[in-house]
Amino acid sequence: MEQRLRVGILGAARNVPFSVLEPIRNNADLAAKIDIMGISSLEQKEAETAAKGWGIMKAYKSFEELLQDSSIDAVYNVLPREVRAAWTIRALMAGKHVLSETPLGVNAKEALMAQRAAEDCGRVLLEGTHPKCHPVTKRVREMIMHGKVGSLEHIDLNLPVGHGLDGKMVCSRAGALMSLGCHGVAIVRFLAGEEPRVVSATAQPSKESPDVDTTMSCNLRFSSGAAAHIGCSVALDSKESPSVFTITGAAGRIRVKEWFTGKGKSANEIALEQFDESGERSVERIDN
């Protein structure tokens, strides 16, 4: 019999049901392989409330108690960004595999330290960059690989606040880059199949909190010569807007409207236009 993966959750963030619990319960394959054993939070009372409300077996008294539990194989780390990497490293050193919420850390140094901890401890560390697993992103990558637009020239991506899982108010406190821009980088990396370098970047600070960026615009370049632009905004007036990206190649263009978290709409749209003599035009609609 295949051994089930026993998972503990670090943090009682609001996206835990959407990100982990519901997908497991609604997917028979996952439900047959994964057990959510318990949850911990900054305060035991908060963990107890979350465990009761979300149907989780156990509320731990502390993060340390969860990590010391030998029955836990892996943890899902959804703690605040400022302490996320530190607890990821502690979990790895405690012998746990880790699925980290995005971003894994607040800078490259933290990411590198977490990577080295995973290597030294012989444990799996994954960053939960959900756009790479989204059916729309996967379909567009497939179209690029099948030559539907020819050689890739440019990716233009714009993410509204509704693309994030953290909620509008959390995104507005974290800023455009840390709440949305990290997903934008994941998308263009995945679509291009290359590692980008930054050419230029600008940010618009919040009037209420000047240290937080309300919008961010970044231009990237790939070794192949292709380029990309990422724009993202935590402005609340964008909350009902879809994520929009355009992929242009030498032989065609793909335009995408993606309703990532639904917002009552599931018909994500992928429109293909080819530049050759056939002039093929097609529209696909893919559910979330």
Image: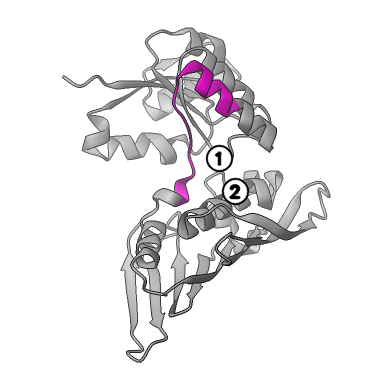
Q: Position of residue 31 (x, y in %)?
A: 26, 31
Q: Residues within 10 Å of mark 1 (few under 14, many from 20)?
A: many
Q: Residue at x 48, y 39 (%)?
A: 128
What stretch of residues is rendered in magenta?
114-131
Three-letter amino acid code at disc 2?
A: Cys
> Any magenta on residue 128?
yes
Per the model, the C-alpha gap separating discs 2 and 1 is: 7 Å
User: Which mark, by number, is residue 102?
Assistant: 1
Q: Secondary structure at mark 1?
A: loop
Task: State the quadrant of the N terminus.
Answer: top left
Residue 262 in sight in this render = yes
Identify residue for label 2.
Answer: 182
On screen, residue 177 above or below 202: above
Q: Position of residue 124 (x, y in %)?
A: 44, 26
> Any magenta on residue 53?
no
Three-letter amino acid code at disc 1?
A: Thr
Task: State the quadrant of the C terminus.
Answer: bottom left
Is the residue under label 1 in contact with that under label 2 (CB below 8 Å)?
Answer: yes
